Amino acid sequence: MSAAAERLIMDVVINPEVIPHFASYAFLASAILIVVALVVRQTAKLVPTGIQNFIEILAETMLKLSEDTIGHHWGRTFFPLIGTIFVFILLSNLMGLIPGFACPTANLNTNAAMAVPVFLIYQFYGLRVHGIKYINHYLGPMRSLPALPLMIMMFFIELIGHFVRPVTLSVRLFGNMTAKHMLLFVLGLMVPAVVPVLILCLGLLVSVIQAYVFALLTTAYIAGAVEEAH
């Protein structure tokens, strides 16, 4: 074992703050999902019951979203990615509703760790499917010599738009989760008996919606990359 690795292990053991708070809960969410997946796999039945029924509902919803947006072939290819993103964000969001727990998605680092790979994946598959013709996705609808200035302008506009996508994915989720926690805290102090119950219900709704929005936008970006440019 290298000296650097030994120092890192000692730092984690002696000083737990080396691992950021949000990362600890992100690892916890990942571990929970892995355990649930293994349990469902080992106990799967032809007629689903209990947790298997719930997992199958989530899986079928994400599969339908993938196939309806991307198409049957590519939808099944990207279904594991989109489904994993959805359930991880959903669980991370819901963890923030449990007293004493933190929400990993209320930190930009967690969200960027998902948004940047999504950006790289759909760019890679865009090049893989279309080759050099993938640049047509950046040139706008017109293809002629007189439209060359407009094509150049569209190229830079599209380029900026694509690089902004991981930022908007990260900030949107971060802003909604942070606002939810602040609202819960403030209203809990003002009216501790009644309002928190209503806000928790609203927080549950926001948690589901934001997980779905992230997965939906991921699906839309991938669909735009693998489809033919017009």
Image (spheres, rainbow, N blue to C red):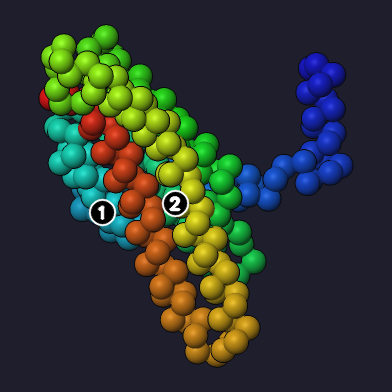
Residue 118 versus residue 86: which sits nearer the camera? Answer: 118
Circle 2: residue type: Arg
Q: Is residue 229 above or below residue 25?
A: above
User: Residue 134, position in %: x, y?
Assistant: 25, 16
User: In the rendered image, is residue 182 in sight?
Assistant: yes
Query: Residue drawn at (55%, 54%), measured in percent from left and top?
Result: 106
Left or right of 179 in this view: 90: left
Decide: marks 2, 1 in contact (CB < 8 A)?
A: no
Asked if residue 56 is positioned above or below residue 69 in the image, the reply reads below
| SS for callout 2 | helix
Q: Which residue is mark 2?
A: 172
Instruction: Rate crowding at label 2 as few (under 14), some (14 to 19) or many (20 or more) other CA atoms within 10 Å.
Output: some
Q: Which numbered dot is residue 78?
A: none
Amino acid type, callout 1: Ile
Q: Which residue is mark 1?
A: 57
Identity of the residue drawn at 18% across and 44% down: 64
Quarter of the picture containing the C terminus is: top left
Work out how far the residue at label 2 is from the one at label 1, CA to CA, in angstroms: 26 Å
Q: What crowding class fits label 1: few (fewer than 14 Cα within 10 Å), some (14-19), or many (20 or more)? A: few
* Image quadrant containing the N terminus: top right
Q: Nearer the viewer, mark 2 or mark 1?
A: 2
Residue 49, percent across and down?
28, 58
- Which residue is drawn at the image coordinates 19% and 34% (left, top)? 70
* Location of residue 184 in the rendering, given as x and y in whole percent from the top left corner: 55, 74
Instruction: Please provide percent x and percent y for residue 155.
Output: 31, 23
Q: Residue at x 49, y 85 (%)?
A: 195
